[in-house]
Image (tube, rainbow, N blue to C red):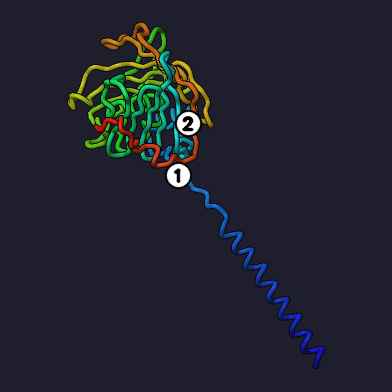
Amino acid sequence: MKKLTLLVLLFGTFISCKQEVKSEKEDTVSETPQVEVVPDRSKDFPEDIAAIFKAHGGIQAFDQMNTLIFELSNPEGNEKHITDLKTRHARIETDKFVLGFDGNDAWLVQDSTYFKGNPRFYHNLMFYFYAMPFVLGDQGISYEKVADLTVGDISYPGYKISYGDGVGDSPKDNYFLYYDASSHQMKFLGYTVTFFSKETSEKISLIEYSDWNKVNGLILPKTLKWRNYEDGVVSDVKSERNFVNVGISKDKSSVSLFKKPLEEKEKSL
């Protein structure tokens, strides 16, 4: 009888240990982080546009990113731009002012009158130029093939990009994307500005994308050159902007980063 009792106790202990091991194993499996699967939207675009995205690292790779940071090089002090790529909330930091957009309102903090522009207009202006061509993969965009842009002896194929009604602050803006026929890398960007007039404009400004950096697998601009452009003729460089200290990552920025600072010197807009 004593032997039977001992066997029962041993068997019970064995079963209990197995259950504890199984429970620990289940807990370990349940704590495994879920990998976010980002769909590849390449087939959603015209073949040429998809090829341009691919030449710059791929639209799927860009869609996996959450935060873009770059500095606009200035002799008087750099501008640091931070953008949430999913919400498009923004923050611009300088020694003289801080400017941002929280999803609803643009705000400006400064202890002088250094910044005289419109924060709503400026908060994403350089971001749009910098994040080309990927921002041309946003929802509500239409693509239309246009005549090549000829610069010197080289012709660059192009597309006109327009927006649906109610898309963004300036749905009447148009962009003209021109790319290298061999590499499919972006080469020129034409654009109109309708933010202030709210009316369609025929005046096209032109940017040359002359140098590139590879950042976390994506090909992003290093230098932008504004060229004189009139009646389809491209001429001299009239200004240029350089970008440094660039970072793009899957890390998410805190929502509080884009909120208006609670300081006495702030200026509400």
Task: Tell me the number on the disc at residue 150.
Answer: none
Marker disc for residue 54: 2
Q: Which of these two is toward me, 68 or 152?
A: 68
Residue drawn at 22 percent across, 29 percent down? 172
Q: Residue at x 32, y 22 (%)?
A: 176
Q: Going by the image, does 151 lie left or right of 171?
A: right
Quarter holding the N terminus is bottom right
Is 229 located above or below residue 103 in the figure?
A: above
Q: Amino acid at mark 1?
A: Pro
Image position, residue 33 (x, y; %): 55, 52
Q: Amino acid at mark 2?
A: Lys
User: Residue beneath label 1, please?
Assistant: 39
Mark 1, residues whose alpha carbon is within 10 Å: few (<14), some, or many (≥20)? few
Residue 207, image quadrant: top left
**For this view, does 202 lie left or right of residue 110?**
left
Alpha carbon distance from label 1 to label 2 = 15 Å
Task: Name the residue: 51% across, 23% down.
Answer: 213
**Position above or below: 70 against 238:** below
User: Visible in this render: residue 48?
Assistant: no
For residue 4, what is the image quadrant?
A: bottom right
Say if 61 sits above or below 237 in the image.
below
Element type at mark 1: loop
Q: Earlier in the sequence, mark 1 or mark 2?
A: 1
Whether residues under marks 1 and 2 lie with C-beta atoms below 8 angstroms apart, the answer is: no
Tell me if residue 111 can be seen. yes
Secondary structure of the residue carrying numbered label 2 = helix
Residue 221 screen position, x and y as percent = 45, 22
Residue at image location 45% in from the left, 44% down from the top:
39
